[in-house]
Amino acid sequence: MLDLAIRNGFIVDVKNKKFIQGDVGIKDGIIQSVGTICTLAKTEINAQGMCVSPGFIDIHMHEEDFELTHGRTYDISERMALMGVTTAVAGNCGNNRQHPRELEKFVNHVGSPINYMSCIGNNFLRKQVGNIDPYAKSTKKQIEQMRIQLYEAVEEGAVGVSFGLEYCPGTDTNEAIEICKEIQGRDNLFLTFHYRKDAMNAPESLMEMVDISRNVDIPLQIAHISSLSAYGNMQKILNMLSEFREEGLDVMADAYPYAAFSSAIGSAVFDEGCFEAWGKSYDSILLTEEPYKGMLCSRDLFYKARKEYPKMIAVAMVMNEDEIVMALQHPLIMVGSDGLYRNHRGHPRGAGTFPRILGKYTREDKKLNFFDAINKMTLMPAQRIGIHSKGQIAEGFDADIVIFNKDTILDQATFEHPQKAPVGIQHVIVNGNLAVKNGEIISYKTGKYLKKTSK
């Protein structure tokens, strides 16, 4: 007997870009059969008229912050589950919100509705070895300590190494190369970079990332390329990406479907010169937390918030929508939310990215082909992070599945209500178990912490 059977759905065949009408049989967390299934199951789901898709994989997000949740409650992982994400990669932009070991402990002991993987971040490691000044260079001793800790994290299962060069101007190219010396040449990892400078500096930033990747001989993943170059030079950057790929460099990128980014108001992202680079003014910055929740900045408020509430998440509405579309359409770009919350406040991308791709950009605006969009959210990121048992609905694959209505799926999260759940997603199955039923989370125990070293 099967544990779970999904009946009568339109099964998304990602590789062949077609629907297969039929059933999916699941046992022990694995897809046992696809097609017409006569075997009985303990639990039956009627998916008549619904899409049965591989679970979405978020290659770029920011995990729970245990200083705020005290290691007991959830902030972002439940938002991920409700929008169909079954596996998420944390520790991005150089910034683990705690050591991956603590995230693993959380998932193993408290549970999680989704699967987690994690990068190890350079900026996090700097703090671990005592360099708390993001503008200061690391000493030789600190670099050596980081190299050891980075190696240990990789041996413990980190999926990649992340850098946040814009957040940490003191990290020079040499430091980035030196801390990776012990893992040089490993092709089962990737380096992911939040660039050093955006807008007119994007080509220079891209070249630095490429140089580091070439020096350490590890594939390059460019984080949220939309917020690097959606200011007038996206086409140039995409052309450069294609050229590097043709030259043999293993380079790809991710992007989210919003013309606004978010970050801590006190971070180096908002240092002097940012408005000149973006061609915007102070009123393009929205503050998301009390005492200024929902307020657009004036000059005085901007500097007051930076000084008094440096950790507050701010949203910068500074990017060009047409260049966001341009990035999402490119064959080397997959979807990543860059989801980040603090006290349940932040950017709606953490609750709306994947349904927004399928609802707005695919169905309504017709900017993306349905199957191409699904690929960018499932098989493409699965292959990128090297989890070859995910990303498809096929026999022997992990039973991570999202069931949704293709005609109604749409994001509902807004800048005023950044965690509002989407519509059109009916069920989410993680490791063969229902995490979301009829649009509501019913289990926080379905996810696992996945290590790159695990089979």
Image (cartoon, rainbow, N blue to C red):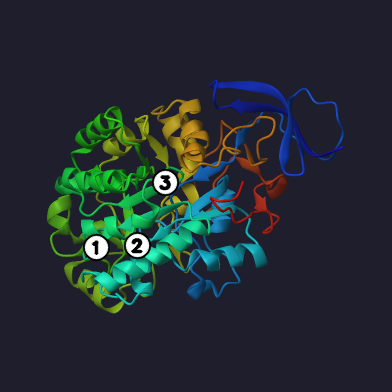
Give coordinates of residue 180: x percent, y percent: 34, 56
Inspect the image, locate mark 3, and give the three-letter code of the amino acid beneath it. Arg
Residue 414 in sight: no
Label 1 SS: loop
Q: Earlier in the sequence, mark 1 or mark 3?
A: 1
Instruction: Choose between 348 and 104: the one closer to the eye.
Output: 104
Give coordinates of residue 231: x percent, y percent: 20, 44
Q: Is residue 369 left or right of residue 17?
A: left
Circle number at residue 186:
3
* Residue found 49% across the figure and 74% down from its top: 68
Instruction: Choose between 171 and 63: the one closer to the eye.
Output: 171
Q: Which residue is mark 1?
A: 171
Give yes or no for contact between labels 1 and 3 (Cβ–Cβ under 8 Å).
Answer: no
Give yes or no for contact between labels 2 and 1 (Cβ–Cβ under 8 Å).
Answer: yes
Label 3 SS: loop
Instruction: Choose between 178 and 240: the one closer to the eye.
Output: 178
Q: Which residue is mark 2?
A: 122
Q: Is residue 266 left or right of residue 352?
A: left
